[in-house]
Image (cartoon, rainbow, N blue to C red):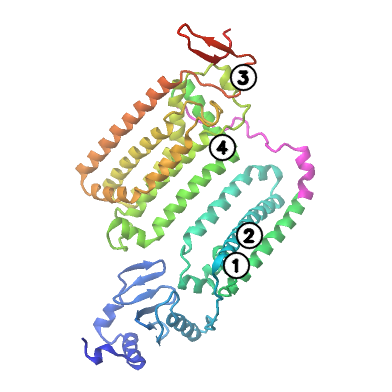
């Protein structure tokens, strides 16, 4: 049991302590103000103090049974605040709110309200039904807001750009909007805690987050008056988005109606097209170049691929910005500099390689046009084994090579060359193995309907790839240890190369054995079918012999 002098402190005692902190009267106090690491973005750690980089405030809060407290001081502006409240621990500590209110008043800023809000209790079947209805209505309105925002962007482009240029940049505008929305969602605090809700009700960047607006709207639809400002912003944003959509759609309709009737939607490109190198034999070059040009001119395929790349990019941002994730992966302090091998970049490159490969494999199974197979039908390209190598090179060119080059640029720029080279070799092995897994049973030409729907088994590859993400943390931890030893790195690279070679042999063997010829689904079914009776008494249904 501590003596009473150690167990009890008044507000006056703490203000005396904070005055000493402001003055920095001793070397020990000044040493305690030195920043040691990162807590969350914008908040750093000193000795026993958290430091807000935006305001220059040192603060610390605490709680014990039925009591909460908050103390802060700002050496830049010369003030200190102590709040002691006889309140039990809750989601939003009242001591933190009072301290922020006082600090904002001292700085001459709009202060957060301390008014009490009574949230009516809800329960039973009616309460559950209301929550369910409020949730899905909020999701519907949020989707309408995003959809209308993209339409407004497209409508402005129609008004500002010539029609031919708009037709070329329209899909890229959609991809940009998708990536921006996804990145903003990931960069903001994903858990609506006390501090993020306070910031969203203020005037900072988080106050412009549509996610928090519609969180307030959900609370309002659910009968809670807790976040009225956010709900009001959601209604205003939705009204502005719908109104602007109606205006730009009307203007676009009046301006482009005649042009739509008189001009084709797809205009011819520049003569000569895009020069592409050779990719092996004539057949391999034809199929790889066909795949590249199909992706360049098909907005639908680019949008689907952008979805997978956007998810991978968002996952990468989440790893980079979350110190807790870094600490969990590395088992090390979160303040490790980027100038050495670190888990976030390792995990980000592996995840991007996986999402890019899976996304490219998915769009390979989606034909550009059901009538676009005639060029391959008349050339006599029928053997699946002949097209497998071309499909492999197409997959590597469109997914593996870009991600690997981007990873190489980042790793060689940030890390010493030896561990960077080791990781790039390991990443290449993982990418080749994943490519062979995706190509197993792929007996078709990319972007053509070379076999009947339901035969692609692409969903199994996607599910398998997503399942591998669960082992991402384990693989990153193992690679961090391996990269410290040059011999261990060489051993892992050799093992991955052997696995990739075995996977390639298995893929080629499956292509040679399962199906000799590529079947195009546009081939009409025979009008007459016969029962082929065999000598052993068995029979089968088939087309009549020629």
- Label total for image: 4
The residue that label 2 is drawn on is 141
User: Which of marks 2 and 4 precedes in the sequence?
Assistant: 2
- Give the x, y percent position of residue 513: 41, 20
Q: Which residues are magenta?
A: 253-279
Q: Point out which mark residue 467 bears.
A: none
Residue name at image x 67 percent, y 45 percent: 166
User: Which of marks 2 and 3 precedes in the sequence?
Assistant: 2
Q: Are the residues tagged 4 and 1 within 8 Å (C-beta)?
A: no
The quadrant in which residue 507 appears is top left
Mark 4 or mark 1: which is in front?
Answer: 1
Q: Mainly helix, strand or loop, the magenta region?
A: loop
Residue name at image x 46 percent, y 51 percent: 313
User: Which of marks 4 and 3 precedes in the sequence?
Assistant: 4
Query: Badge 1 local density, few (<14 within 10 Å), some, or many (20+)?
Result: many
The residue that label 3 is drawn on is 525
The residue that label 1 is drawn on is 217
Query: Badge 3 local density, few (<14 within 10 Å), some, or many (20+)?
Result: few
Image: 449 above or below 74:
above
User: Which of marks 1 and 3 precedes in the sequence?
Assistant: 1
- Give the x, y percent position of residue 441: 44, 28
Q: Point out which mark residue 296 bears.
A: 4
């Amino acid at each position: 049991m501590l003596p009473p002098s150690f167990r009890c402190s008044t507000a006056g005692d703490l203000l005396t302590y904070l005055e000493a902190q402001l003055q920095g009267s001793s070397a020990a106090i000044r040493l305690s103000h030195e920043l040691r690491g990162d807590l969350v973005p914008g908040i750093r750690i000193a000795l026993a103090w958290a430091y807000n980089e935006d305001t220059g405030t040192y603060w610390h809060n605490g709680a014990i049974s039925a009591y909460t407290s908050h103390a802060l001081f700002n050496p830049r502006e010369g003030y200190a605040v102590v709040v002691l409240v006889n309140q039990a621990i809750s989601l939003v500590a009242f001591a933190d709110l009072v301290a922020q209110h006082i600090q904002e008043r001292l700085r001459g800023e709009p202060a957060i309200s301390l008014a009490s809000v009574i949230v009516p209790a809800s329960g039973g079947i009616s309460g559950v039904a209301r929550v369910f209805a409020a949730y899905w209505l909020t999701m519907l309105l949020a989707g309408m807001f995003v959809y209308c925002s993209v339409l407004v962007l497209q409508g402005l482009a129609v008004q500002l750009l010539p029609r031919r240029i708009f037709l070329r940049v329209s899909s890229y505008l959609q991809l940009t909007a998708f990536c921006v929305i996804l990145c903003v969602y990931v960069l903001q605090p994903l858990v609506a805690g006390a501090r993020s809700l306070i910031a969203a009700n203020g005037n900072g960047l988080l106050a412009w987050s549509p996610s928090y607006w519609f969180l307030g709207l959900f609370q309002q639809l659910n009968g809670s008056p807790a976040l009225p400002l956010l709900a009001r912003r959601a209604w205003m944003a939705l009204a502005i988005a719908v109104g602007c959509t109606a205006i730009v759609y009307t203007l676009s309709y009046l301006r482009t109606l005649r042009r739509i009737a008189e001009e084709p939607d797809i205009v011819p490109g520049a003569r000569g097209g895009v020069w592409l190198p050779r990719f092996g034999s004539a057949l391999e070059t034809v199929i790889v170049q066909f795949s590249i040009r199909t992706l360049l001119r098909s907005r639908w395929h680019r949008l689907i691929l952008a979805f997978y790349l956007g998810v991978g990019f968002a996952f990468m941002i989440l790893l980079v910005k979350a110190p807790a994730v870094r600490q969990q992966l590395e088992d090390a302090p979160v303040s490790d500099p980027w100038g050495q091998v670190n888990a976030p970049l390792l995990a980000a490159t592996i995840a991007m390689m996986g999402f890019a490969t899976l996304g490219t494999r998915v769009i390979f199974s989606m034909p550009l046009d059901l009538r676009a197979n005639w060029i391959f039908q008349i050339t006599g390209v029928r053997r699946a084994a002949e097209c497998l190598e071309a499909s492999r090179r197409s997959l590597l060119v469109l997914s593996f090579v870009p991600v690997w080059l981007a990873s190489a640029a980042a790793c060689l720029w940030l890390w010493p060359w030896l561990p960077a080279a080791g990781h790039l070799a390991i990443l290449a092995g993982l990418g080749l193995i994943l490519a062979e897994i995706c190509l197993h049973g792929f007996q078709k030409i990319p972007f053509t309907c070379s076999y009947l729907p339901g035969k692609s088994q692409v969903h199994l590859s996607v599910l398998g790839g997503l399942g591998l993400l669960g082992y991402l943390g384990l693989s990153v931890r193992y690679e961090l240890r391996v990269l410290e030893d040059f011999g261990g790195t060489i051993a892992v690279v050799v093992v991955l190369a052997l696995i990739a070679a075995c996977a390639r042999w298995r893929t080629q063997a499956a292509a040679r054995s399962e199906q000799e010829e590529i079947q195009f689904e546009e081939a009409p079914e025979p009008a007459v079918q016969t029962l082929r009776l065999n000598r052993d008494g068995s029979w089968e249904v088939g087309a009549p012999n020629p």
